[in-house]
Amino acid sequence: MKNSEIAAYLLQALNMALQIQGETSYTNSFDVKVADEGFYFVPRLPASYIVGDELYQKIYLISNAALYPDFTLLKQAGAYFVPLSTVDIHVKRALFFPWQRGTSQRLIIPNIARYVEQLPRNTIPIMDNLGIDLNKVTSIAIAGNSGSGKSYFLTYLLCVLKRSSQISIVDPKFDLPSRWGRENDVLVISPNANRGKSDFVSEVNNELSKALDLIQHRQQVLYITPETNFEHYTIVIDEVLALSDGVAKPIKEAFFSLLSQIALLGRSSKVHLVLVSQRFDNNAIPISVREQLNVLIQVGNINHKITQFLFPDLSLEGIVIPQGIGTGLIQVIDSEHPFQVVPLLTPTFNKIKGVM
């Protein structure tokens, strides 16, 4: 369809369903303009309706259903205002609705080892139309209930990260990440049957302390030679809630403090955190760490109760979430992606011998 045809189709849908004090495009109360990256709802002001978050969400609900599956509107936390280039004060602003063409498409990878070898360094593909630049993110969080596919997705991330980053793994469950680390000669910190939990978390704190020392050293180097290009270093912690729950208070406080400092200081020195947990409430990680997360991933069952920690301001109404294992939501917060939540389908790849 041409942009003009899409605009006419959207106007028809909005005129029939919007119901804003009887105002329609037929009375010249609003208009729709379509661009390659999304569409603009242009209200003619003054108007008898309020142009704000409630109106934005109503338009989103109507338009997202009308456009699916040719386009997927990208959910915003609030009204997305943009200025328009005109001298007419009545139509100098619009509500913008960014979209992606089609729907989210899962990556199907027949051979993960060969696939990773061909990837550009510092690139983490997530879906056919979505990827992450490791240079532009610091901390990644993966949340999901048991059986949601988060460990499977973590294995994919480990395979891809190894091409661009040195990795250390903390695995309280002594499970899949430990086996992957063994097969790939990567440092793994896991529990020992002869040691208590507090002793194990103390060892984790020791590794986090080394990472903080690395950050401080690299910051000193950058102070002298700011163009220095460091190798990426990533600390992966599986089931972070299992670490922070039930340990002595001083050890937990030290763990939280180290996590906070790495999250706050790691970006310029290319030190990253990948955190995995069933949930990310205040018992799992400090608020300061949650506020620094650049990539937010929720897999499995999606409802407001579950998403309240990673997406506290998000209304799920109207989002078309794919069904099945390894599906959910993702938000990438960097200089490249708008602050929006996208339906997620995690990659599918071949089983890895000795790991899965």
Image (cartoon, grey):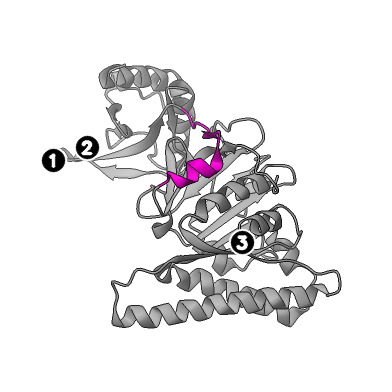
Say whether residue 221 is left or right of residue 45: right
Question: Marks 3 and 1, how far apart in space?
Answer: 64 Å
Q: Residue at x 37, y 44 (%)?
A: 80
Nearer to me, 337 or 325: 325
User: Callout 2: few (<14), some (14-19), or many (20+) C-alpha neighbours within 10 Å?
Assistant: few
Report x, y in % for residue 107. 51, 35
Nearer to me, 112 or 106: 112
User: Callout 1: few (<14), some (14-19), or many (20+) C-alpha neighbours within 10 Å?
Assistant: few
**Marks 3 and 1 in Cβ contact (< 8 Å):** no
Q: Which residue is mark 2?
A: 90
Question: Marks 1 and 2, how far apart in space?
Answer: 9 Å
Name the image quarter holding residue 221: bottom left
Q: Which residue is mark 1?
A: 87
Q: Residue at x 39, y 39 (%)?
A: 50
Q: Which residue is mark 3?
A: 185
Nearer to me, 251 or 64: 251
**Secondary structure found at label 3:** loop
User: Magenta segment: does it hold 109?
Assistant: yes
Q: Amino acid at mark 1?
A: Val
Say whether residue 279 is visible: no
Say whether residue 310 is left or right of residue 98: right
Question: Marks 2 and 3, how far apart in space?
Answer: 64 Å
Name the image quarter holding residue 260: bottom right
User: Callout 3: few (<14), some (14-19), or many (20+) C-alpha neighbours within 10 Å?
Assistant: few
**Secondary structure found at label 1:** loop
Magenta-tinted stretch: 103-119
Foreground mark, 2 or 3?
3
Q: As drawn, which residue projects farthest toward the right?
A: 194
